[in-house]
Image (spheres, rainbow, N blue to C red):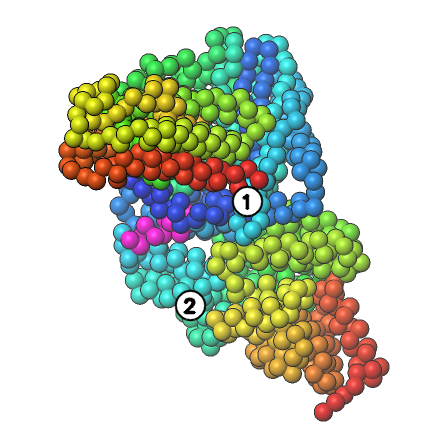
Amino acid sequence: MAAVFAVALVVFMLVNRGSRVHDTVSDADNPAALVGASTDTRIKSFQALVRAHPKDSRGYGLLADAYLQKVRETGDASYYTRAGAVLHTALRLNPRDPAALTGASTLALARHDFRGGLDYAEQARMAAPYVVKPLGDIVDAQVELGRYAEARRTLHLMVDAQPNLASYARVSYWRELHGDLPGAIRAMKLAVSAGGQAAENVAYVQTLLGNLYFTVGRLDDSREAYRTALARFPGYVPASAGLAGVEAAHGRFSIAIRRYRDAVARLPLPQYVVALGETELAAGRRAAARRDLALVGAEEKLLQANGVNTDVDLALFEASHGSPTRAVVLARRAWAQAPSVRSADALGWALTRAGRPAEGLRFGHRALALGSRDPMFLFHAGLSASAAGRAGEARAYLARSVALNRRFSPLYAPRAERALAEIAGGRLQVTG
Amino acid sequence: MRARVLLIAVALFALLAASASAHPLGNFSINHLDRLRVSADRVDVTYILDQAEIPTFQERGLSSDAVLAKKRAEVERGLVLTVNGARVPLAVAGPGQISFPPGQGGLKLTRVVLPLVARVPGPRSVQFHDGTFPGRIGWKAIVAQPGSGTDVHSSVSSGDPTSGLRSYPKSALRSPLDERDATLSVKPGNGSLTAPKGPDQGEATTHNRSGDGFAGVFADAAAGRGVLVFFLLAALAWGAMHALSPGHGKTMVAAYLVGTRGRARHAVALGATVTVTHTMGVFALGVVTLLLSQWILPEQLYPWLNLVSGLMVVVIGAAVLRKRVASSQFPVPSHHHHGHHHHHPADGGRRSADISPKGIIAMGASAGLIPCPSALVVLLAAIAQHQIALGLLLITMFSLGLAATLTGLGLVVVYANRLTSRINMSGRLVAALPAVSALVIVGAGCVLTAHAVPQLV
């Protein structure tokens, strides 16, 4: 009550000062005029549009889409809350509004509610069968839920209907998961040259292209891709983190750590914090690493407080740097909700770290079933096989993990090579 | 317009309830606010920082002094003040304050308030840039406040919808502010400020906000087409309803009137005292808060006020009890013997000799003094909006509403007492009632005190 009154008072004061939002509406009434406008401009215009037409669900759909783009650009999660509220209103006004349903789907996927996201996207598809955008969410959901054959069919529909940045990037990811790295690079290049509405979108696919180059060991191309992304979208954290990774692969740990630190200072997402901590471990800075990695634990608490407890990245973190038992719990939940190759990899690694390598290896096989050449998947499967006493299999996996990029990780690539040497030296007892 | 205000408030309530504990701007955010005041010979800046859970966690292990020093260094590095075309150093003008309020997931937040000053004779043009915490997400704002001896024309708003980064607008149709630059042109004058009205309506009309006083309020009321009247009535109604929430002295007032066998005019006097003390209490607390905000956070004051009022109630209860015990040695007053009691023969046999003006005031004061954070929030929000007169008016109406309920309750008790006096009841029970009431007062006081103590440790 107290807060409501205080806020009402403030609102009264603001309203009382006379609002002139209608001045900007003429601009927003015509969304076509906003093509190429910055996300902030679009947000402002759509906010004015919604205030001017509060009963029209379409304005809310546009605004939510701009909010979701803002999160991609800044990592500012408070825009998720805003997008959620706006979408709620839109769907109350019109439960079949295609843009609002698509927004709700994207938001659900962002919260790792893949089934809910799929449901919304399919509703959007039914409400507007010729709109392509929901197909992207359907593909993402199907991939995360491990329904790769279905994802392939949807992807075909999508590319045929609209060969653009969004569809090419998804083709690339699908190929990457299936081990076709040259094909993935070709598709991602197409995505880059297709261009996008927001600068961030292009910077994003350029960063993904950099990641692919990194995976296949083309470090210079990789660095070039990250630099281009940063030139297009200055301060773009995923690209800065990518550059840090390249430095680490060259063994320049101090520069890498400084770059990661900079990325973490701006956007302390668990994946960047883990990369920072692992680079510090590789550089022998154990105390700093322990301190930084503790941040991931704090973030886990916050995620739990917000009802999120199925994150694959957190499971991998717990398996490598925390409690393997907890990692098994997290990964099992992730696997139950979304049986993808990523959750299979996390669960396999967690089981191996928890002292159940035979079981772990079974999930390692599932992670690699599509033909993935992800060095981390291979490294995890290799160590699982090694711990399960299957030296031949272990050697094959570990050799493949370092085959493309001998420095795929500052911490794990040397471990893979050490394990290979141990197997070659016959120090591993082959049992059974 | 009224409907819209209400609608927004209702929506806000729903949103507030939904995310009670999470930081509204995200666990990563670093939010900061500069309050600028340009006077004839100086520029004052108050830098306020509200840092969410994750950046606070990243500084764990540092002492609060070390964190404060770190923030001071960042502020000294990041704030750029240019007066009449030349850069002027901003000096830290006090120790500043730091606190760590609880956040989500058992983590803490960081809150820093840092006063700075630049002494410059005759500022004409002032540019201010806040380059602290570059690239970090959050609410970044600059607000202008009227100084002394100047007429200031500001590019940034004078209104702060966050009340000093304590609460953030929850409307899904507003983005967090990202304001890092301010330009002010200054003329000698009598402390006026012309600034954009709201953060989102920068290009809208400007208005001189100082020296308006009540005239300004009523001008605004005219502009608001009766919204002011609506708000005053709302404040009255809210005060009346608020009095019914637990812990607002209803029980004590009722028990006091029963215990002392008060009459209608006592109930009214009690209500009036409550109005006056509650209004004064909130005003005083507001003033003290503003004065002490240099050193103490207002949240830290509430527990002490709770303790004081709790102890006061215990003492009053004990006093009434003592009188009851003493008077019980006299013959039990019986309702059949009208005129038995000397002072108020027309009183239906009730004796109210032991109600002294002092007792009424003490009781009313203790009921009114119990700090009412909500009322203080309203006052502080009004001050933050430079709508002090309106804030005071709202508080007065609120207190009147509070008093109306308490008086009404008192009257009910008094008349119920008279009614029971006409019905033939067991003399012993009625005689015991005042003593029981006194015990209730003491009990309520003990509960209040007991509630206050844990907040202090």
- Mark 2 or mark 1, whichever is nearer to me: 1
Q: For the residue labelled by badge 2, is the local secondary structure a helix, a strand or a loop?
A: helix
Q: Name the residue under label 2.
A: A115
Give how far apart the Cα atoms at labels 2 and 1 are: 35 Å
Say above or below: B385 vs A188. Answer: above
Residue B109 position, x and y percent, is 57, 43
Disc 2 with disc 1 on a shared chain: no
Residue A289 among those drawn in magenta: no
Q: For the residue labelled by badge 1, is the local secondary structure a helix, a strand or a loop?
A: loop
Q: Residue B280 is drawn in which quadrant?
A: top left
Q: Relative to residue B178, is residue B85 drawn left or right?
A: right
Q: Which mark is residue B102?
A: 1
Amino acid type assigned to the residue bearing label 1 in the image: Pro
Mark 2 crowdedness (10 Å alpha carbons): few <14, some 14-19, many ≥20 = some
Amino acid type assigned to the residue bearing label 2 in the image: Arg
Residue closest to the eye, A103 or B343:
B343
Range shown magenta: A82-92
Residue A40 seen in this snapshot:
yes
